[in-house]
Image (tube, rainbow, N blue to C red):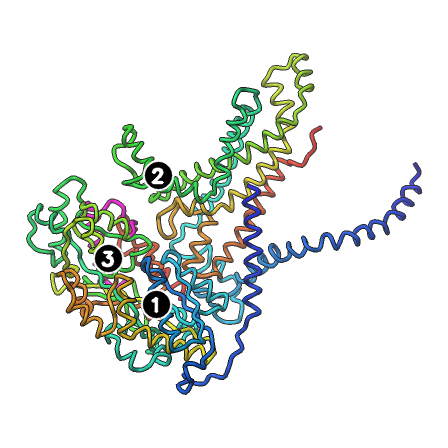
């Protein structure tokens, strides 16, 4: 077809596209309003708030913005005395990376297993989804009480089986509480990830695998060169949603850490709430803004490194 | 995880709606006529709201009793009551303040922040002079702000004293409650020597109680947080007090985790495995209910003087909503609340101590046990935390977040850190 014809087609198509967009507006409007209301407005308010001084009770002091004081001032989010900020930033990265990676690896194994035909498979699938059906707060609370120093059931089990001599106050030590929170976060992230990957596995065409088998590919070869590439979109979706979700996960760490104040077991998300309680919404918003940027950076790195949207060749 | 995202969205929508609702409802302000004495109770038509913490299961009913009585004289005043648990109460208050929805009457344990922001009525301007005069002067003084204004009226008091397990004392051969720090160490040592997991002294430095516990050690060393207009955490007395706390911990005389809350320590007391702790009347009542025999003494100080006791009062504050009718109704409601007929059953519902002179006297005459009497007597000797000072909020937060580190960090350095947090907010 000639170049002319393509241009002609474009000219003809343009007004119709505009009209298409115009007719779509009434249908899109509610969503757009909702997005403006629940995403854009709060986000702008957060940025705005971060430039004003507030009291602990949330009363604004003075009408003039105070520049970057809430970020790096004497009582700023990054510079408030007594806050081990370097350690907390490191914790945040460790938290996201460890939880998401371990969740993905375990989910790949679990999904592979659940994809095999065996008796009681449906029942087992049901059991695996249960942690997801429970509220995260509930799950974390069960662990919190179970790990109490004197009365916790997990402690009791460890003492009675001789693993420990006396019960430990697991949740009152920032480090042990952090790693227990990592464990719980993996536990509650598994079901969603497993199911996403399981769905991906079921779309792997049986005949391609059979053909590879006939051609003499070993099962590791089949998995690495056929199954895994086909799973890429599923893994990418699962990883991205997990990163965002884990990064923002507040209840698990909040419930499992009983140490007061600015201890070394915080991540930026829990620190934000600590600030809100002790320093008011100004400083807390400042950290939220940083958190938001941080989250974007992590996702950007992920996208650049993995390029999950790249089509399978 | 999708359903969590969805929940978040719903929550956000709800909060946006709530926000916009608040923005629109600026109260039409009638002229600020001073407390309407000439208004006929039957004609007064308005709505007032109360925000109060839950002291006990009966709290809501206790307030409702007063509201019902109030309606007999003021049939057209609607009273909206909101009761919230102590857990997260500060956040609830902050949320209402930030939304501009000030409760007319707030029952809380702090007032300096709101007073400083100019949100409150001078409480003696709202309540009648007779009601103000009925409150025990030493307790009333606790509601005076740094600027000398009576911003708040105490509504309930509690005193913290040394509570000790008499059975354990007998077993360990200790005849008298310790008066000085040296005697305290000695007694705690003998208690720990009993074995069976007995803890000598319970030191709760968790988020809830750290400010009270650390203040007692500071006072015991003869110091104070107040330094003229300012608060200071780094006085030599504070260092001395914190050094003593560290000494007790290092000698293994306290519970193993200093970041325990008061309830953790109370649990030990109730289980009969704790020798001494600083506690209020509820601790005594709970322990006795579990069959643990306890007695009271002033908290030991450095040299074995008169000892110290901490007083804690909660307050009633009235927010300025710029509405003369609401102010009049608020005043009338509070006058009724503090009247002997209403106040007696209300304060008993909280299981704490009264603040009106007549009720303190009555309670003393009715006190059936030594322990009940002890707390009431202590009310006249107690020291108070500097709640009227605006810097106290910062100091309290810093103590609550860091005081437990005294077990592992150098006291002077720790206090300097606490001071730095206070200064940073200055």
Estimate how packed mark 3 is, as few (under 14), some (14 to 19) or many (20 or more) residues with alpha carbons within 10 Å.
some
Task: Compare marks 1 and 3 and give the one earlier in the sequence.
Answer: 1
Label 3 marks which chain's residue?
B
From the image, which quarter does the C terminus of chain B lie in?
bottom left
For residue A282, say whether it is visible.
yes
Query: Picture coordinates of residue A92 (x, y %)?
Result: 48, 44
Q: Which residues are magenta?
A: B234-261
Q: Which quadrant would residue A149 be assigned to in this image?
A: top left
Give the answer, above or below, for where A153 lies relative to B166: above
Q: Is residue B64 magenta?
A: no
From the image, which quarter does the N terminus of chain B lie in?
top right
Q: CA distance from mark 2 to mark 3?
A: 27 Å
Residue situated in front as seen by the camera: A71 or A163: A163
Q: Are marks 1 and 3 on the same chain?
A: yes
Give the answer, above or below, for where B44 lies relative to B300: below
Query: Picture coordinates of residue B336 (x, y %)?
Result: 33, 75
Query: Picture coordinates of residue A127 (x, y %)?
Result: 49, 31
Give the answer, above or below, for where B89 lies relative to B332: above
Estimate how packed mark 2 is, as few (under 14), some (14 to 19) or many (20 or more) residues with alpha carbons within 10 Å.
some
Q: CA distance from mark 1 to mark 2?
A: 41 Å
Disc 2 or disc 3, which is closer to the eye?
3
Q: Give the secondary structure at mark 1.
A: helix
> Which residue is painted at 8% across and 55% down in the image?
B176
Q: Are marks 1 and 2 on the same chain?
A: no
Residue situated in front as seen by the camera: A278 or B54: B54
Q: Which residue is mark 1?
A: B65
For residue B391, say whether it is visible.
no
Q: Give the secondary structure at mark 3.
A: helix
Q: Which residue is mark 2?
A: A146
Q: Which residue is mark 3?
A: B282
> Which residue is painted at 24% across and 51% down in the image?
B266
Q: Give the secondary structure at mark 2.
A: helix
């Amino acid at each position: 077809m000639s170049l002319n014809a393509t241009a002609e087609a474009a000219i003809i198509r343009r007004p119709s596209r505009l009209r298409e967009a115009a007719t779509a507006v009434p249908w899109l409007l509610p969503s757009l309003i909702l997005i403006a209301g629940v995403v854009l407005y709060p986000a702008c308010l957060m940025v705005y708030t971060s430039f004003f001084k507030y009291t602990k009770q949330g009363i604004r002091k003075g009408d003039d913005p105070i520049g970057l004081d809430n970020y790096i001032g004497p009582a700023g989010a990054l510079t408030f005395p007594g806050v081990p900020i370097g350690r907390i930033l490191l914790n945040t990265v460790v938290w996201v990376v460890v939880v998401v990676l371990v969740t993905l690896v375990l989910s790949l194994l679990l999904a592979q297993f659940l994809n095999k035909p065996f008796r009681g498979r449906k029942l087992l699938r049901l059991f695996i989804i249960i942690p997801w059906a429970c509220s995260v707060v509930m799950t974390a609370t069960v662990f919190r009480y179970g790990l109490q120093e004197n009365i916790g059931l997990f402690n009791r089990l460890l003492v009675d089986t001789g693993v420990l001599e006396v019960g430990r106050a697991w949740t009152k030590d920032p480090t042990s509480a952090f790693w227990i929170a990592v464990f719980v976060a993996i536990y509650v992230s598994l079901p969603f990830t497993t199911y996403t990957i399981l769905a991906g596995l079921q779309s792997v065409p049986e005949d391609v695998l059979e053909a590879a088998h006939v051609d003499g590919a070993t099962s590791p070869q089949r998995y690495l060169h056929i199954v895994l590439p086909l799973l890429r979109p599923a893994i990418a979706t699962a990883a991205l949603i997990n990163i965002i979700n884990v990064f923002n996960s507040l209840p698990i760490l909040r419930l499992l850490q009983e140490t007061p104040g600015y201890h070394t077991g915080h991540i930026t998300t829990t620190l934000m709430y600590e600030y809100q309680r002790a320093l008011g919404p100004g400083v807390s918003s400042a950290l939220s803004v940083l958190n938001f940027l941080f989250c974007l950076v992590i996702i950007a790195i992920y996208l650049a490194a993995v390029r999950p949207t790249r089509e399978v060749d | 995880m999708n359903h969590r995202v969805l929940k978040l969205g719903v929550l956000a929508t709800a909060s946006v709606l709530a926000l916009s609702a608040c923005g629109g409802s600026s109260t039409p302000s009638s002229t600020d006529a001073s407390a309407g004495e000439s208004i006929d109770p039957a004609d007064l038509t308005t709505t007032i709201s109360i925000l109060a913490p839950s002291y006990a299961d009966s709290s809501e009913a206790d307030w409702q009793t007063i509201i019902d009585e109030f309606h007999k004289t003021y049939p057209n005043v609607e009273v909206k009551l909101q009761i919230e648990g102590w857990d997260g109460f500060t956040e609830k208050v902050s949320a209402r303040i930030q939304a501009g929805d000030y409760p007319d009457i707030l029952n809380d344990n702090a007032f300096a922040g709101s007073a400083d922001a100019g949100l409150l009525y001078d409480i003696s301007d709202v309540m009648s002079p007779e009601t103000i005069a009925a409150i025990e002067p030493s307790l009333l003084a606790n509601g005076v702000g740094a600027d000398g204004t009576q911003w708040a009226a105490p509504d309930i008091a509690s005193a913290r004293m040394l509570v000790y397990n008499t059975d354990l004392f007998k077993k360990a051969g200790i005849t008298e409650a310790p008066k000085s720090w040296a005697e305290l160490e000695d007694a705690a040592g003998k208690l720990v020597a009993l074995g069976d997991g007995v803890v000598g002294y319970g030191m709760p430095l968790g988020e809830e109680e750290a400010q009270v516990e650390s203040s007692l050690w500071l006072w015991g060393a003869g110091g104070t947080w107040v330094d003229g207009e300012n608060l200071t955490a780094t006085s030599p007395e504070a260092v001395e007090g914190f050094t003593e706390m560290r000494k007790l911990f290092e000698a293994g005389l306290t519970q193993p985790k200093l970041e325990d809350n008061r309830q953790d320590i109370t649990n030990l007391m109730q289980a009969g495995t704790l020798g001494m702790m600083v506690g209020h009347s509820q601790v005594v009542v709970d322990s006795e209910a579990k069959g643990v025999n306890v007695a009271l003494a002033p908290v030991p100080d450095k040299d074995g003087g008169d000892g110290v006791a901490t007083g804690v009062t909660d307050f009633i504050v009235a927010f300025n909503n710029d509405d003369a009718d609401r102010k009049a109704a608020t005043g009338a409601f509070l006058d009724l609340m503090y009247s002997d007929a209403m106040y007696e059953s209300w304060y008993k519902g909280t299981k704490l101590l009264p603040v009106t002179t007549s009720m303190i006297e009555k309670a003393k005459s009715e006190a059936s046990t030594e322990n009940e009497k002890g707390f009431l007597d202590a009310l006249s000797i107690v020291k108070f935390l500097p709640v009227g000072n605006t810097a106290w909020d910062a100091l309290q937060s810093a103590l609550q977040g860091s005081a437990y580190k005294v077990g592992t960090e150098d006291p002077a350095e720790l206090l300097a850190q606490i001071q730095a947090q206070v200064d940073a907010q200055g």
